[in-house]
Image (tube, rainbow, N blue to C red):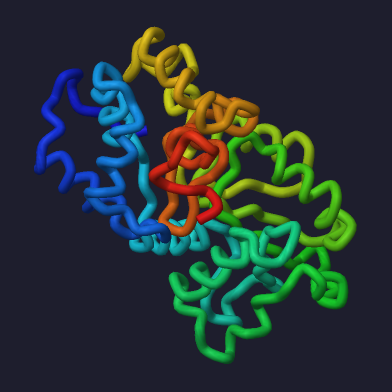
Amino acid sequence: MNTPKARGASINTARFNKWLDSFAAYRAQVTRGSIEMWLNQFEDNDKDIAARILDAVDFYGQERISSLQKKLLGSINGWSNHSYTRKGTWRFVPFSRSAGESGDRMLHEFRIANGMTDKIYEELFIYRSEIVKAKLSSDDTIVLVDDFSGSGKQATDAWNDIFSELIGNAPKIYLLLLASSKKAVNRIKDETRMIPIVGHLLDDKDSFFSNNCNCFTSQEKDIILKYNKRANYKAPEGFDECSFLIVFSHRCPNNTLPILCSRSHNWEPLFPHNA
């Protein structure tokens, strides 16, 4: 998470403008009015904490996403944009359990970011249903593309339920992620054959309710937990209790604080997960 402003800092026009500059690219439009409506759901004494949470949000806009996708691909040994210097056969696949999930969008953005929109690159990009007929060997590489893993559960479930049978034991397999927790990376390494390649690694200090998160006091965390229960009483600390403050321009993961992403009958999020 980013470092928030000092306690008691004025919630003024300059602060609003900084939030708007940061969050303008979110798929559900963020305006000064929507920020004010979100803040007004907090009691007056709690608005300072809410404002500091907005300061701490780590937002990934399109330029940042594209830059990371280019950097991550370049870090994998054997890759080259030129087929004659590329080691083995390569295939890029969306890491999605079903159509329309984040992996599909990420693969499209990944292709653009890495300058592979021409027809000569078309064979490199396949759907998961085409993995078997690709007949990849131990000299070849599959890169599964997604955006985020908070706990590693969804990634390992997708591997065990779907991808492990399709890919088999032959090719090298990388899971390319814009961001992930250390917990998720370790789980993926331990429970799958995938090798995580991560742009930004989150640790305990990035988890709001962790004892290692020192940007907010225990009392402040208790206050926010009360609001999180209004937003999502089933998972008040976010999915698998991750409680991150991470938001992508195309979606807000459910591992993020519920007050930011979850909608209920008495709570309206600023970054709706299902917008």
* Direction from residue 13 to residue 99 in the image, left or right: right
Where residue 62 appears, as percent x and y from the top left, is 37, 62
Where residue 40 appears, as percent x and y from the top left, is 29, 33
| Viewer-nearest residue: 136 or 181 | 181
- On the image, which quarter does residue 238 sit in? top right
Where residue 84 appears, as percent x and y from the top left, is 59, 82
Quarter of the image with the N terminus in it: top left
- On the image, which quarter does residue 162 sit in? bottom right
Q: Residue at x 54, y 38 (%)?
A: 264
| Viewer-nearest residue: 235 or 211 | 235
- On the image, which quarter does residue 126 sit in? bottom right
- How many numbered marks appear? 0
Asked if residue 241 can be seen in this view, the reply is: yes
Where residue 165 appears, as percent x and y from the top left, is 89, 57
Asked if residue 64 can be seen in this view, the reply is: no
Q: Is residue 257 above or below residue 164?
A: above
Q: Residue at x 39, y 44 (%)?
A: 270
| Viewer-nearest residue: 107 or 216 | 216
* Direction from residue 16 to residue 149 in the image, left or right: right
Q: Kindly give the residue lying farthest to the bottom in the view shown.
A: 119
Q: Kindly give the residue lying farthest to the top in the view shown.
A: 219
Q: Residue at x 70, y 64 (%)?
A: 142
| Viewer-nearest residue: 5 or 145 | 5
Q: Residue at x 59, y 84 (%)?
A: 121
Q: Is residue 3 above or below residue 122?
A: above
Q: Kindly give the residue lying farthest to the front in the view shown.
A: 265
Q: Is residue 55 above or below residue 271?
A: above
